[in-house]
Amino acid sequence: MLIKRIRDWDLPESAATPEHIGLNRRAAIATMGAATLGFGSIGAARAATPMEVKIEDPGYSKAAMRFDPGRPLTPQKNAERYNNFYEFGLSKDIWQAAQKLPVEPWTIRIDGLVEKPFTISFDDLMKKVKVETRIYRHRCVEAWAITVPWEGFPASELVKLAKPLSSAKYLRYTTLADHKAMPGLSIPFFPWPYHEGMTMAEANNELAFIGTGMYHQPMPKQDGAPIRVVLPWKYGFKSAKSIVRIEFVKDQPETFWEKTSPDMYGFWANVNPKYPTLRWSQARERLIGTDKTVPTVIYNGYEKWVGSLYAGMKQDKTLFM
Ligand code: MTE
């Protein structure tokens, strides 16, 4: 199947190089240190193949195209070798280091405001859900983007299994912190373990997804094996990898990046090209695996599905940082 460029969020592409990427940030990192910045090095794209992959694989069925991303898939190798996984270090080149991630056995604790807290093994969880493919854009706050065929199941399925009480308004999800395997945990200024949150309404939105694989394969360790969150309308840092606990809570949970850099990153983190960070523009994004940059679109192109979630809210910077 071929991705057609006819969707309402489709983007005119331009080869212009955005000067905001890398330079400001690198200079800032050099002068201020990563502690005050939050995100680490941006760096140039790793030896990228300047080629696009069209989605011609018949395995990407019609169902997978429900949310047609309007752009070609990122070549698998590029998507899987350009990562943010600070537990393994601040560089993008952690895919080999991440092979130390211990994934078996893997359990997930579901607790907080639920009928009955429980711990479930990854294998048992997989018996309770129906895995499907979703092709989504993923837009990092650092202004790079990939387009990935994920395997997984809707986050709403997980909510159903958890049986939250009516007092539960948010999900707080926490990821693995294994000091033996993860050298990044010794970076002192980060509030480990990595933890993030979303509202119940967001979790029940049909776009919210729990990823267990990509490119028809189990989730690579560097991408958050065996199970991660995928929220394509938000900056990538909301999509926490290697989840071990999901807690249902009443109040908006404080998140890893809010604690690290409250002036830069917030709870909502919905993509919006109009709101730059303190240090760089969010107007464009660099497509990993190509030499292209393209304009960024509000809600990363998914407004049609998620815009109503925020309709009653103040449409200001806090919704988009
Ligand atoms: N999850 C954990 N546990 N640790 C991280 O450092 N980084 C986040 C997110 N989830 C991160 C994480 C950021 S900033 C991004 S952009 C995405 O993971 C990157 O996902 P990818 O490397 O699979 O493309």
Image (cartoon, rainbow, N blue to C red):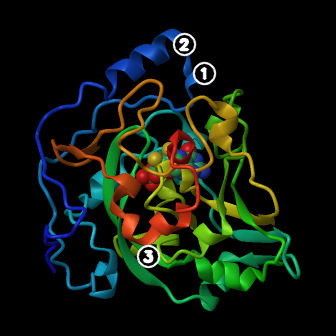
Report if the CB atoms under discs 2 and 1 are less than 8 Å apart.
yes
Tell me what residue is drawn at x 26 percent, y 84 percent.
59
Which structural element holds mark 1?
A: helix
Which structural element holds mark 3?
A: strand
Circle 2 residue: 32
Q: Residues within 10 Å of mark 2 (few under 14, many from 20)?
A: few
Which kind of residue does numbered mark 3 sit on?
Glu
Tell me what residue is drawn at x 66 percent, y 76 percent.
122
Circle 1 residue: 36
Query: Which one is nearer the viewer's eye here, 245 or 303?
Result: 303
Relative to 212, residue 9 above or below: above
Q: Nearer the viewer, mark 3 or mark 1?
A: 1
Which kind of residue does numbered mark 1 sit on?
Thr
Q: For the residues marked 3 and 2, what is the alpha-carbon distance in whole angstroms?
A: 39 Å
Horizontal and vertical percent position of residue 143: 35, 40
Which structural element holds mark 2?
A: helix
Please say whether residue 219 is visible from this viewpoint: no
Q: For the residues marked 2 and 1, what is the alpha-carbon distance in whole angstroms?
A: 7 Å
